[in-house]
Image (cartoon, rainbow, N blue to C red):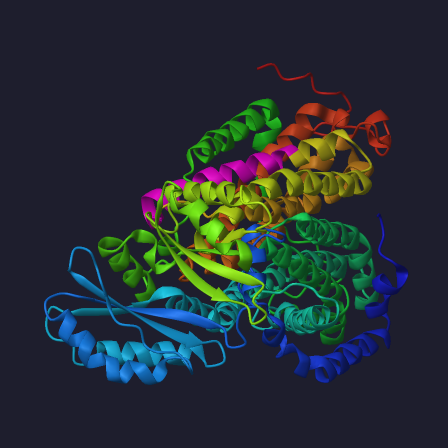
Amino acid sequence: MTTLPKRLAGAPGGSRGKWFVLLAWLILAVALGPLAGKLGEVEETGPNAFLPRGAESAKVNTELEKFRTDTLMPAFVVYTGEGAAAKADADRPRLAPLVAGGEQLPPAVRSDDGEALMVVVPLSYEDEITDRIEELRDIAGAGAPPGVRAEVGGPAGSLTDSVAVFDTLDSTLMIATGLVVAVLLLITYRSPLLWLFPLLSVGFAAVLTQVGTYLLAKYGHLPVDPQSAGILMVLVFGVGTDYALLLVARYREELHRQEDRHEAMKTALRRSGPAILASAGTVAVGLAALAFADINSSRSMGLVGAVGVVCAFLAMITVLPALLVIAGRWVFWPFVPRFGAPIRKEATVWSRIGALVARRPRWSWLMSAGVTGVLALSAFGIDMGLRQSEIFQEKPESVVAQELISAHYPSGASDPAKIVTHADRAADVSSAVRDVRGVARVEDGDRTPDGRLATLQVVLADAPDSTAAKDTVDRLRDAVRTVDGAGALVGGATAQTLDTQRAADRDLRTVIPVVLVVVLVVLILLLRALVAPLLLLATVVLSYFAALGASNLLFESVFGFAGVDWSIPLMGFVFLVALGIDYNIFLMHRVREEALRIGHARGVLEGLTSTGGVITSAGVVLAATFAVFAALPLVTMAQMGVIVGIGVLLDTFLVRTVLVPALALDLGRRFWWPGSLSVGGGAPDRTVDGSAEERAPERV
């Protein structure tokens, strides 16, 4: 893994090769571009899209498809306040035409305390649910007397509010991410033109990513959901820009050394290519490890993300070099790199930091590890789990309706547990569950057209997303298993939450070891050592826990979130370990190169100084792109953005800048054990001042 394949490394450098590469990408973009807009057609939005594969609640959803050719989804209109009954009666003639064909509008259900009325409106999946909900809300909101509230919720209302979020998600993320990247590149390069080239290259990568994802979803059964599709573009922009920054920085250096820009690009690709390849491979394979997850949305995000990283890598080592070589040196104006001119250091601050670390490396890594360790302590006090009413940053109407239902009815009335059983044992199953603690009432449901299966609706005494309701579901499942031959399954919203929570725990135990092994293998192959990869991996894991702890403090004290979604620890770990290791790869690949040339100690400092500016820029860009999530209405995505953003900044400014160089300096050549550098390979080891004597180990 020391060089790129010759075709990839040399293609953009030739006088005609660059035009061939650019033409090939243009043809691909024009020919396949129409397919990029079809990604939404293959997104999975069904009831099992975010559930664990093989979960009992998912099996119930599958079985429910057998019951009706015209599947119904209920909406609830909840009326409260004096005059609620008159308002409900006045709305009934206007609500009736919205009911699914062949169904009657049920009478209003008065709450036990007499302070609320609830009208159940059965809607058809064959109709446009979101349009029907908008009509319901218009009817309920029209002509309400003072003091009377009419809120529309239920499963159909929740679905509509969720769809409204995802409908604008892709466009919002694309625009916000593009603007953030453009501004940061403009600041980084201080050139009115150069920033366009990475952005154009990322644009090519985005098109290829959407096309590839669409084709794999349509013909290769790649799972894609709206959430993973939205994160996909942010990931492509983030990692693509990182690779562009690294390549452009190395190309600028080579333009000072070589007169021919084609040769300069070949050298830049040859020297930075292994780090970019290792980074892309680590991120892609790390994300692909989510294929072992049970939760469908996690599997979707991992596999889709891996496709995006591969496409970003291909664009950055082909189309970006071609564009830069075609444009020539003037694209760097006003800071044009001249052949033979001394290389201008991006920022002397990195050499100063390196000098400070070199004076007392052991104290440096102990203090930086202590800071991250203190932040990590907050990760052990996280409140896990979000209720349905807590997944939005601002409460939509469906959540308000659910709160009214919980206040005036049995909390589970809005979304009862669903039991699917063999029809001939339905009565026995009903008897078995009636006396289960936490059950408010049991209602008979429907039968399949062939009469083989039947459903039961079990209204729970507690709110559907409460811990007490989850315990009741466990008791229900135990109860139905006692009925021989019933084949009963328990599903519904509470069962789905419970199954997702348990699957998230299993996924943590399954996926995390796979990701760690993958990252370790890549680092061993790249650095040809064992000690260095183990230490680098340990620093990234430490920064992950620090990011989790710091984020939790923000969630509680600033954002006011009720807890952390069950999916966040795993997704945050995979993203941070895979992305965070990037900066260690960029740094240590350069350090190893310099150590072979000028010795270990000086090589560490030269690597830090040479990569400081570009890695910092890359970290800020990546953190800023993920920070875009914090402004989204979904709490889960906001939490993902905050954790990844903080983790990347910790890796950039603390782990890569202080902790890793300090460890390398403190251990000396042992850092490269058992590779050739650990036994005197490369240039003689010299101290920072150039003397050949080894510095005595620092005592703490």
378 within the magenta span: no
Residue located at (35% from left, 55% from top):
389
Q: Position of residue 696 (x, y in %)?
A: 69, 16
Q: Which residues are magenta?
A: 538-561
Q: Is residue 231 visible?
A: no
What is the total number of numbered labels drawn onto the structure image?
A: 0
Q: Is residue 197 left or right of residue 694?
A: left
On whether residue 550 falls in the magenta region, the answer is: yes
Extreme-right residue of the structure: 6
Judging depth in this view, the residue of 296 and 48 nearest the camera is: 48
Q: Quadrant of residue 217?
A: bottom right
Residue 105 x %, y % = 32, 77
Q: Is residue 567 above or below residue 175?
A: above
The answer to which of 668 and 378 lies nearer the viewer is 378
Q: Choose between 410 and 479: the one closer to the eye.
A: 479
Q: Is residue 464 visible?
A: yes
Residue extending furthest top? 699
Q: Position of residue 645 (x, y in %)?
A: 50, 50
Q: Main secondary structure of the magenta part?
A: helix
The image quadrant of residue 604 is top right
Q: Is residue 249 above or below residue 95?
A: above
Q: Which image quarter is the C terminus in?
A: top right
Q: Nearer the viewer, residue 38 or 429?
A: 429
Question: Which residue is at a point 75% across and 65% down the rendered structure image?
Answer: 314
Name the residue: 43% across, 48% down.
431
- Above or below residue 63? Residue 589 is above
Q: Position of residue 79 (x, y in %)?
A: 21, 68
Q: Is residue 283 above or below residue 46?
A: above
Quarter of the image where one finds residue 62: bottom right
